[in-house]
Image: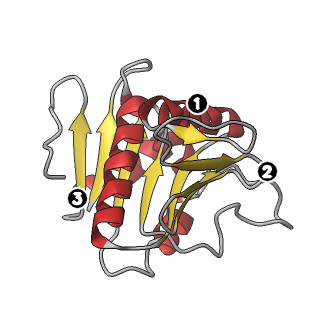
Amino acid sequence: TRTLLYSAEGGGKTSLAAQYAGVQIIRCAERGLHGHAGVTAPTHGRLKTMLEALFAFMPLDTPHGRTFGSWGTHFVAENEIRFAFPFVLQLRSTKPQSAASGSAIQGMNWMFSIDDELQDSAEQGADPNIEARLRAVKTSVRMCTATAKDSYGWRNFRDEKEKSPDWRILDRKSTRLNSSH
C-alpha cells in the first residue's frame, strides 16, 4: 500500500505522481467514496511544482476561469482542489512553520496521500504525521517520490521502509510501474 519511487532530478517522478493521484481520484469516484486526500511536498515552492503537474494531467477550473471537461476547481486560498463529486484534494507543505502553529497537516483524515520529494519531508519529521492522516480509512495508499540523498537520516529511514512488507521501493530508470497498483 506504500510505494517509494526513486529517480534523478528531472526524471518524471512528479508527473507520474500527479497521474497516480488522478487514478486514485477516479477510483474513489467509481466506488462512490467521498472524503479527502493529501498531496504533500517539503516546501511551498515544491508544492507549486506538484500543482502544475496536476493541472497538466487533469483539467481543473479556478475561481477565475473555467476549463472544458474540468474535474474540479482549485481554490488557491485553501490550497485545495474540490472535485465534482464530494472529494477534496488538500495540498500541504510539510515544512514546519513554527512550534506554536504545529504541523500543516495535523487534524486531517486522508484516503490516500501523494508525497513528493519524501527524502526532505522525512528529514523534517513529517512522515509520522502523514501516516496518522491515513489511519481513518481501512486501507490507505501512498505514492511517494524521492531523489537520492546522501544523508544518514534519510538512508536509515529508507532502509526501515525497505524492510516493511507495506512498502515497495522502485527505481524509475529500471522499473516500470504495474497498472494494478
Q: Residue at x 28, y 71 (%)?
A: 31
121 relative to 150, above or below: below
Gap in angstroms between the C-alphas marked 2 and 3: 40 Å
Residue 43: x and y in percent read 67, 40
- Give the mark nearest the N terminus, 2 or 1: 1
Which mark is in front, 3 or 1? 1
Mark 2: few/some/many CA within 10 Å (<14, 14-19, 20+): few
Q: Disc 1 designates what residue?
A: 49
- Give the mark nearest the N terminus, 3 or 1: 1
- Give the mark nearest the N terminus, 2 or 3: 2
| Amino acid type, mark 3 | Lys
When asked about the image quadrant of residue 5, the answer is top left
Residue 148 visible (yes or no):
no
Rendered-image quadrant of the N terminus: bottom left
| Amino acid type, mark 2 | Ala
SS for callout 3? helix
Asked if the residue under mark 3 is in contact with the one under mark 2, i.e. CB atoms within 8 Å, the reply is no
* In the foreground, 130 or 137: 137
Residue 73: x and y in percent read 61, 49
Residue 132: x and y in percent read 50, 74
* In the foreground, 68 or 38: 68
Q: Is 116 placed left or right of 94 in the picture?
A: left
Q: Is 175 placed left or right of 87 in the picture?
A: left
Q: Disc 3 designates what residue?
A: 163
Q: Disc 2 designates what residue?
A: 77
* In the foreground, 110 or 83: 83
SS for callout 2? loop
Gap in angstroms between the C-alphas marked 3 and 1: 31 Å
